[in-house]
Image (cartoon, helix red, strand yellow):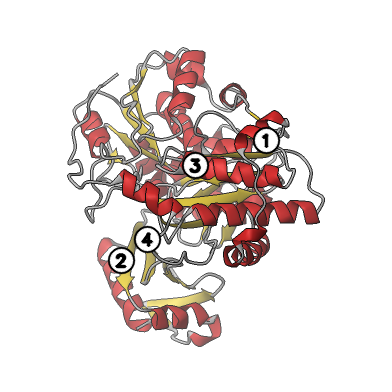
Amino acid sequence: MVSELAGTLSTQKIDTQALHSAFFAPGKTPVPVKFGTSGHRGTLGEGFCALHAQAIAQAVARIHLENHITGPVLVGGDTRLMSRETARLCAEVLTGNNIPVILPDIPVPTPVFSFEIRSGRACACLNGTASHNPPQEMGLKYNPANGGPADGKLTAQIEKYANEYMANPSAIKSLPLAQARERGLVTTADVITPYVKAIGQKIDFKKIAASGCRFAIHPLGGTSLPFYRAIKEKYGLHNVDIVSEVQDPTFCFIPLDHDGKIRMDPSSKYPMKPLIELVQKGVYAFAGASDPDADRFGCATAQGGLIAPNHALCVMADYLVKKHRVKGATAIGRTLGTTALLDRIAKHYELELDEVNVGFKYFVEGLDKGRLVLAGEESAGMSVSGWTTEKDGIFAVCLLMEIQAVAGDIAALYKDIASKYGTPYYTRVDVPTDAETKARIKALKAADFTLPQVAGEKVTRVRDTDGLKVYLENSWFLVRPSGTENILKIYAETFTSEEHLHTLISEAQKVLA
């Protein structure tokens, strides 16, 4: 194991005691509960505090009781500062409503929550995480009986009820954890063994172990650490090194991101710099990482350096289809902002292409029904039918290691795919804006876009289900207002040239100004 990794580390001081105090006693009135694409998130204090956790848990309890949902709720979280306290508060509220709780004694990855629900050991979950966001932030997600992120109708109900309890905290029921344990309402569980055993039926670890490759894995201080350890031990992966086992809720050992903030983002070249250097120096052929709640993946290889998530998704999709690894699936799924190279791969293999709004919750039905060979997001989330209905960064890293062991460098494989179907030029640009402009863009309908051409190409279709996406003859662009910040996200892709991509972005900004 490599004990220390190089990188530009944070010099900022994170006052954990102040954040702890703000969680229990915010200096300002807490913001209302608002579920985004995957849960409620905010900065510790007014953005996310103990009352948010209790109110959301009471809302979930009410929904379970009203709908006669029975069975234990799996409660836990990632390795963030207030994750354990958030889980405790949720457990106390649920048991205060006489709902049984499974409360593991270790941090739990997001995909493992889904796996446990799909396995029938839990009926739902409350998961304390803010994904790869800065360490000052915290959040809470709810997954129902299908194991995936709750849909819009359900999250709207949770929001409604939770905000009622935010306004009237005395209506929240709670039972101290010790008493809940005495009454048998709280149990623990081994969540590592079942997952590690099951992933061995999906990933060919024998080929990874037998390959001549050396692999590195970095859990980025997150929940995946004991799972990678168990996988390494169970499947005899002597050529796989876990290069960092540091767990620190300030995440100060993670190199700073582009804006000087700490983000545990495995798809960013800044936090991934130490791993990129390891493969560039030839120490490893492949280095993989997953974020703190292990629902996103990242990787770097000797030939390609950091691999863009879009590229990795294409390689995984092509490999899974060629190897007939997802039996009975008939489609590839991608979100609106993910590469259209997946469309060309799907067409070649005579598969359907499911294009969904941004958010993994839109893949749940396709994954649940066994329809999707792969469901992927440009933001580095993926899963497959027959596995979790949540995105799984651990699974993705293991699958990419198998591909590297069996077929060669991920970057070379992507280059082959692009040479066969066309090379896409892709980018995302975040444009500062104001609330008024965000509201205007959000309200745009396809009929409002009347230009026959953009960037020298004919407009073939316009979609308005999640922002505005304009499809051109050989390219596309998408403008979406952020749900949490005053920015517009402009995604664009062309199969023409890098120069055309810049023109496309420029024209998109003019059109939507």
The amino acid type, in three-letter code, at marker 1 is Ala
| Quadrant in which the N terminus appears | top left
* Whether label 4 touches label 2, CB < 8 Å: no
The amino acid type, in three-letter code, at marker 3 is Glu
Q: Name the residue beneath numbered marker 2.
A: 501
Mark 4, secondary structure of its residue:
loop
| Quadrant in which the C terminus appears | bottom left
Mark 1, secondary structure of its residue:
helix
Look at 50% across and 16% down and name the residue there: 206
Q: Name the residue beneath numbered marker 1.
A: 180
Please tell me whether residue 161 is drawn above or below residue 512 in the rendered image: above
The amino acid type, in three-letter code, at marker 4 is Phe
Q: Earlier in the sequence, mark 4 or mark 2?
A: 4
Rate crowding at label 2 as few (under 14), some (14 to 19) or many (20 or more) other CA atoms within 10 Å: many
From mark 4 to mark 1, how far is it between C-alphas?
A: 59 Å
Q: Name the residue beneath numbered marker 3.
A: 85
Q: Is residue 168 left or right of residue 248?
A: right
From mark 3 to mark 2, how far is it between C-alphas?
A: 46 Å
Q: Which mark is residue 495?
A: 4
Q: Position of residue 6 (x, y in %)?
A: 18, 33
Can you tell which quarter of the image residue 175 is in? top right
Look at 63% across and 54% down and name the residue there: 150
Q: Is residue 373 left or right of residue 83?
A: right
Please tell me whether residue 487 is drawn above or below residue 8 in the rendered image: below
Q: Position of residue 331 (x, y in %)?
A: 62, 49
